[in-house]
Amino acid sequence: MQTIKMKVTGSQQVVGQEPMVTELTTEGLFYTENNAYYFQYDESPLSGMTGSTTQLISNGHERLVLKRKGPQSSTILEFEAGQSFTGSYDTAYGSFIISVKTLQVASDFDQNGRGRISLKYLMSLGKEEESINQLEILIF
């Protein structure tokens, strides 16, 4: 396991509204296991998910799994270009169906985990309106 620094920039936009952008620079962990690359970091109060840990698992190409677990919520999302995924978003107030359709996912990093992960997807939570989401992660 190696300590890394990550700059995580996320945006979410509901049609007809201004995008909501969050940015976090933090330390995290990087390791490899079973031909997969793992990136892990703790969420900050800015994300509204204090106490949560996010783990990104990449195959090094065009597939990414996001696992988030914490006191407020827990979820697992899978992203692969052109594919849709439906899962659950578990909160203290109950579970919600979450659906994502991946528009673009790309990973470009070296054997030490330094590089970039880029993700763009459509998401709907329960019967809520669909949003366009982007996630850019710089690992250094």
Image (tube, rainbow, N blue to C red):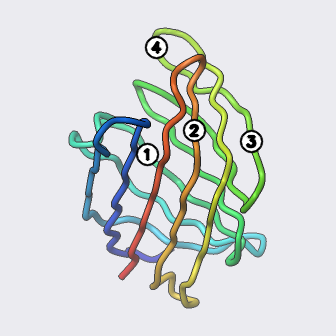
Category of crowding for the residue at label 2, using alpha-carbon neighbours closer than 10 angstroms: few (below 14), some (14–19), many (at least 20):
many
Q: Where residue 59 sits in the image (x, y, percent)?
A: 72, 71
Q: Disc 2 marks which amino acid?
A: Met
Examine the rendered structure and indicate whether residue 102 appears above or below residue 53: below
Disc 3 to disc 1, C-alpha distance: 21 Å
Residue reaching furthest bottom? 110
Relative placement, left or right, of 58 versus 51 is: right
State the CA–CA distance, disc 2 to disc 4.
Answer: 21 Å
Q: What numbered label is drawn on residue 97? A: none
- x, y (%) of residue 139? 40, 77
Residue type at the position of mark 3: Phe
User: In this rendering, which labeled residue sits more in front, label 3 or label 1?
Assistant: 3
Label 4 crowd (10 A; few <14 / some 14-19 / many >=20): few
The residue identified by callout 4 is 92
Along the polypeptide, which appears first: circle 2 or circle 4? 4
Q: Residue at x 64, y 74 (%)?
A: 32
The residue singled out by tag 1 in the image is: 53
Q: In what element is the residue under mark 3?
A: strand
Q: Are marks 2 and 3 in contact (CB under 8 Å)?
A: no
Q: Any mark on residue 85, and which? A: 3
